[in-house]
């Protein structure tokens, strides 16, 4: 073969290698599954370098030994799953020195290199190894053995270095994904612990609180004078504690999932009427007035009745508690296209513009938490939005400004 033919053959081989490297890059960026990535990298390295076998060895973060995690070829050396120490191995030397190593006359080098794991078989006659670097950290070694045609050279080392660089990025991304998945699992576990704790604590608190409420009510009715006043104070504090326990119980409803709903066709007029009935005592205590507007005929939707009723009760509670006594409140149910709109309107203190969205944040209170006059954890409106969104609806508030009242709206799709 003359010089021109040799140059053409070399160029053809270079084009093939570059095309293969592009394919490798595209494939590595299309998956983050660690095992799939490692097997593909090993197979690609053997293919691009026209080698019989390829092995990827990664550093064990605990022992610092090298673990053969993926291989390609009929009899890779070392075999996948093999652990080799850094001392006394070619991979260990490449790892420490952070530079490629080319061995094309293995027999001639056996005496100097000794019985390394890579050279433990007579079938190895040539070897190329490069360090795999990830953000200046050497994470492993990529080895190919037994070039089918000719000998390994510096061009092969550069090509394998490119494969190693692509591999390092892919391995780094797969580790990030694994870390993220582990973190999500841990967050899920902690969230379940939180829910379990709230459920158990709420249940355990209800029993003694019920006894306190019962005896305080009896004492208030039967005792007189100062004793009755003390009983009234105990009863008031116990009722406040009961309200806080209910807030704790409903904490998990802020992020309620749509699949957890118990949907059934329901006349929404009945849901609003039940919610209004649940706040009658609060209305009487604050001397407020509630006006209800319902459509003439049934307005049916598939809803989780208890949760929608809870959301509406929270809207009504909010209108009563965060306004002065004797406030006028309107509760309305109307149909708007393919949605049912629940609206609770008050003529009380109103809201400034920057509070219209923040009032739906968990634990947010319009008043400063150290000086506020109103009780509660600030979860009611967060629960309203969570329940609305779980039903594929939404919730928002409108207010002309301080002193001009506010209108809260919750929407539910209609069947």
Image (tube, rainbow, N blue to C red):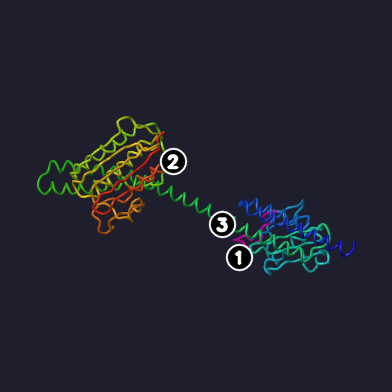
Q: Helix or strand or loop: what does disc 1 sit on?
A: loop
Mark 3 or 1, nearer chain start:
1
For the residues labelled 3 and 1, say whether their Cβ atoms are less than 8 Å apart: no
Say which of 10 and 179 sits in front. 10
Q: How many C-alpha atoms fall within 10 Å of the one at disc 1: few (<14), some, or many (≥20)?
A: few
**Alpha-carbon span between mark 2 and mark 3:** 30 Å
In the orientation shown, which residue stands out farthest toward the right? 1
Q: Which quarter of the figure has residue 9?
A: bottom right
- Which disc, if any, is residue 258? 2
Say which of 201 and 20 sits in front. 20
In the orientation shown, which residue stands out farthest toward the left? 225
Specify start and end residues of the magenta stretch as a single range: 59-70
Image coordinates for residue 283, horizontal then vertical, percent: 21, 42
Name the quarter where the C terminus is drawn. top left
Q: Which residue is mark 1?
A: 135
Q: Helix or strand or loop: what does disc 3 sit on?
A: helix
Question: Is residue 351 highlighted in magenta?
Answer: no
Image coordinates for residue 5, horizontal then vertical, percent: 87, 61
- Which disc, if any, is residue 176? 3
Say which of 251 and 398 sits in front. 398
For the residues labelled 2 and 3, say whether their Cβ atoms are less than 8 Å apart: no
In the orientation shown, which residue stands out farthest toward the top? 297
Mark 2 or 3, nearer chain start:
3
């Amino acid at each position: 073969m003359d010089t021109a033919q040799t140059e053409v053959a070399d160029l053809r081989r270079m084009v093939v290698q570059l095309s293969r490297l592009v394919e490798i890059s595209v494939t590595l960026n299309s998956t983050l599954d660690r095992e799939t990535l490692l097997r593909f990298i090993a197979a690609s390295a053997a293919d691009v370098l026209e080698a019989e076998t390829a092995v990827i060895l990664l550093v064990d973060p605990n022992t610092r030994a090298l673990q053969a995690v993926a291989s390609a070829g009929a009899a890779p050396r070392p075999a996948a799953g093999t652990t080799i120490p850094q001392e006394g191995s070619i991979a260990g030397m490449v790892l420490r020195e952070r530079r490629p190593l080319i061995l094309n006359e293995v027999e001639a080098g056996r005496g100097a290199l000794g019985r390394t794991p890579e050279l433990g078989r007579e079938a190895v006659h040539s070897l190329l190894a490069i360090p795999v670097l990830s953000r200046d950290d050497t994470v492993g070694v990529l080895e190919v053995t037994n070039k089918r045609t000719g000998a390994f050279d510096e061009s092969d080392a550069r090509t394998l270095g490119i494969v190693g660089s692509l591999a390092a990025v892919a391995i780094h991304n797969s580790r990030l994904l694994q870390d993220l998945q582990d973190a999500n699992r841990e967050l899920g576990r902690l969230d379940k612990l939180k829910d379990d704790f709230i459920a158990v604590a709420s249940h355990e608190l209800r029993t003694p609180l019920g006894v306190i409420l019962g005896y305080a009510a009896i004492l208030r009715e039967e005792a007189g004078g100062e004793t009755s006043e003390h009983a009234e104070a105990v009863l008031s504090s116990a009722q406040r504690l009961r309200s806080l326990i209910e807030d704790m119980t409903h904490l998990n409803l802020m992020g309620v999932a749509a699949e957890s709903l118990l949907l059934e066709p329901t006349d929404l007029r009945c849901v609003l009427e039940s919610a209004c009935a649940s706040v009658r005592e609060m209305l009487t205590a604050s001397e407020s007035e509630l006006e209800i507007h319902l459509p003439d005929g049934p307005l049916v939707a598939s809803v989780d009745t208890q949760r929608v009723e809870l959301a509406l009760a929270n809207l009504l509670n909010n209108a009563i508690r965060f306004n002065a006594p004797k406030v006028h409140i309107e509760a309305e149910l109307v149909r708007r296209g393919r949605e049912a709109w629940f609206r609770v309107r008050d003529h009380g203190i109103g809201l400034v513009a920057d509070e219209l969205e923040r009032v739906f944040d968990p634990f947010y209170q319009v008043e400063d938490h150290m000086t506020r006059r109103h009780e509660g954890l600030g979860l009611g409106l967060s629960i309203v939005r969570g329940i609305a969104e779980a039903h594929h609806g939404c919730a928002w508030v409108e207010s002309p400004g301080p002193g001009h009242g506010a209108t809260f709206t919750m929407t539910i799709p209609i069947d």
